[in-house]
Amino acid sequence: MVANTLGRDGDRLAVSVYAGVFLVVTLALGLLWTYVTSRKRRPPLLRVDHRHPDVRDVSARLRIAPVTYLAAIVVANYHALAGLGLTLALAITFALPPRTRR
């Protein structure tokens, strides 16, 4: 949908919908992650402690993602390519491995 409408009428709406889908998916993933990493879970669902650097890194990414996708939706209403760029930048951020602190 986005590729077919870029540069045409409706491109801003297409990018807004695209970022909106990612927003919903991120919110659902965030809820699931909160459940999995809960300190109160007995037995715990993670093999590592909830204070592990990788767990903290993913948690931080999931906290910032909804705000960024909301920003992408707002920006896409003014400039489709800028909104798409924000969405793709966040996707790349999630594709990168967690930072390890040793």
Image (cartoon, rainbow, N blue to C red):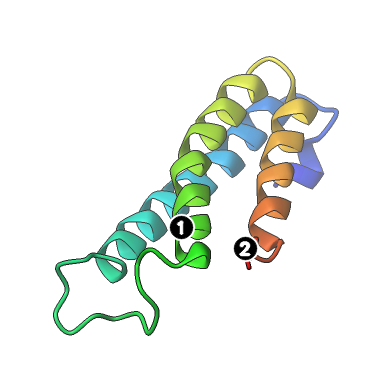
Q: Residues within 10 Å of mark 1 (few under 14, many from 20)?
A: some
Numbered circle sitting on residue 56: 1
Apparent side of residue 66 relative to residue 68 in the rendered image (left or right): left
The Cα atoms of the two marked residues, 1 and 2, are separated by 11 Å
Query: Disc 1 or disc 2, which is closer to the eye?
Result: 2
Nearer to us in this view, 9 or 58: 58
Q: Secondary structure at mark 1?
A: helix
Residue at the spot 31% in from the left edge and 67% down from the top edge = 37
Q: Secondary structure at mark 2?
A: loop
Where residue 15 sits: x, y (%)?
66, 35
Nearer to us in this view, 46 or 73: 46
Residue at the spot 30% in from the left edge and 57% down from the top edge = 31
> Number of labelled discs?
2
Q: Residues within 10 Å of mark 2 (few under 14, many from 20)?
A: few
**Amino acid found under the numbered disc labelled 2:** Arg
Where residue 82 sits: x, y (%)?
76, 26
Residue farthest top in this picture = 78
31 over 17 or under it: above or below: below
Residue at the spot 40% in from the left edge and 79% down from the top edge = 48
Q: Which residue is mark 2?
A: 101
Quadrant for the C terminus in the image: bottom right
